[in-house]
Each structure stands twice: as structure tokens, then as C-alpha cells.
Amino acid sequence: MTSGLATSWVFNWRADSWYGKFESETHTFVDGVTGHCVLQHSCAENRKIWGQSHFIGYQIQGLDKGRVHVTLSILDKNDQLLRTLLEEGTSAAPQETDFSKYWGKDFTPTAEDMAQAARADGSIRLRVVLRLFLDGLA
């Protein structure tokens, strides 16, 4: 692949509520390289402690490792940025990442987050902005 090649993904996706596990649609960056995001409440994996902790993250498949600039955010009822939960790397200095697992952040939504993000049907919207740098790959 061409040196310096980067491919970007900006995607608003839906979680039906704050509770459960919700995945975004899968995005294809290039042939054989895909990505998706997840929002998961702490009890979704049968953990014994019920809490307000959540995990938001992304996973790239088709590559063992690479470099990224990623931002994961909560949107308000009008699809405006409410709060950025994670930013890794920058366009000028991407984050070196091992893609064998989900990468992301544990967080606890505030009462304000929950009130300002919830739509009439109880769903919330999230945004991923992910720039995957493919330079140096065969």
C-alpha cells in the first residue's frame, strides 16, 4: 500500500438504551480490513456487581496492529456533541495499537449525560471518528 495512506470513518450509531450491549454497523476500510464499535453496560457480561460503569470501544479486524487517531463521543438529542469519552492519537502522531482486542474506555455516564442524550424512545446516539493509517503495510 502507498506510504501515508489513511482511511477515515465518521459514523453516528445507535444504542437502544444505556443498558445492554450495542454494536455499530461494520465499516470496511479497505478489502479485508473492517471496524466496528461497541457500547456495553457493566452487567452485560454477567458481572455480579450491578453498577453504572460502561465501556465504549472499537475493534479493527483484518490487521494485527496499526496506527489510529480515534475519537468516541456521546451525542445529544439533536446529534450535537455532548461529551468526548476517548481520544487516542492525533492525525500528526497516531496511536500505535494492537488490534487483537477492543480498545476503548470505561466510563460512568453522568445524570446530565443520561438526560441530555436520551431520545423520546430511550435510545442514544454515539459517534466514532476513526482514522486508520495503513502506511507501511504490505
Image (spheres, grey):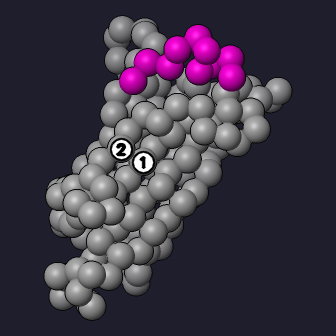
The answer to whether the residue labelled 1 contacts the one labelled 2, judged by CB atoms less than 8 Å apart, is: yes
- In this rendering, does residue 60 appear at all? yes
Q: Is residue 115 above or below residue 80?
A: above
The residue depicted at 59 percent of the width and 32 percent of the height is 82
Residue 87's mark? 2
Q: Label 1 is placed on what type of residue?
A: Thr
The residue positioned 59% from the left and 21% from the top of the image is: 113
Residue 111 colored magenta? yes
| Residue 21, horizontal then vertical, whole percent | 51, 35
Q: Residues within 10 Å of mark 1 (few under 14, many from 20)?
A: many
Question: Dividing the picture into quarters, in which one does residue 117 lie?
Answer: top right
Tag 2: residue type? Glu
Which tag, 1 or 2, sits closer to the chain's start?
A: 1
Q: Which residue is mark 1?
A: 71
- What whole-number distance in Å separates the C-alpha atoms at marks 1 and 2? 4 Å
Between 26 and 44, which is closer to the camera in this rendering?
26
Q: For the residue carrying disc 2, how many other residues have a C-alpha within 10 Å: few (<14), some (14-19), or many (20+)?
A: some
Could you say which is closer to the camera, residue 117 or residue 83? 83
Instruction: Tell me the chief SS of the magenta region.
Output: helix
Report the span colored magenta.
Answer: 107-116
Asked whether the viewer can see residue 39, the reply is no
Q: Residue at the location (43% across, 34% down)?
A: 85
Q: Which element is circle 1 on?
A: strand
Horizontal and vertical percent position of residue 77: 74, 33
Instruction: In the displayed orientation, state which residue is furthest to the bottom.
Output: 2
User: In the rendered image of this protein, does residue 34 appear above or below residue 37?
Assistant: below
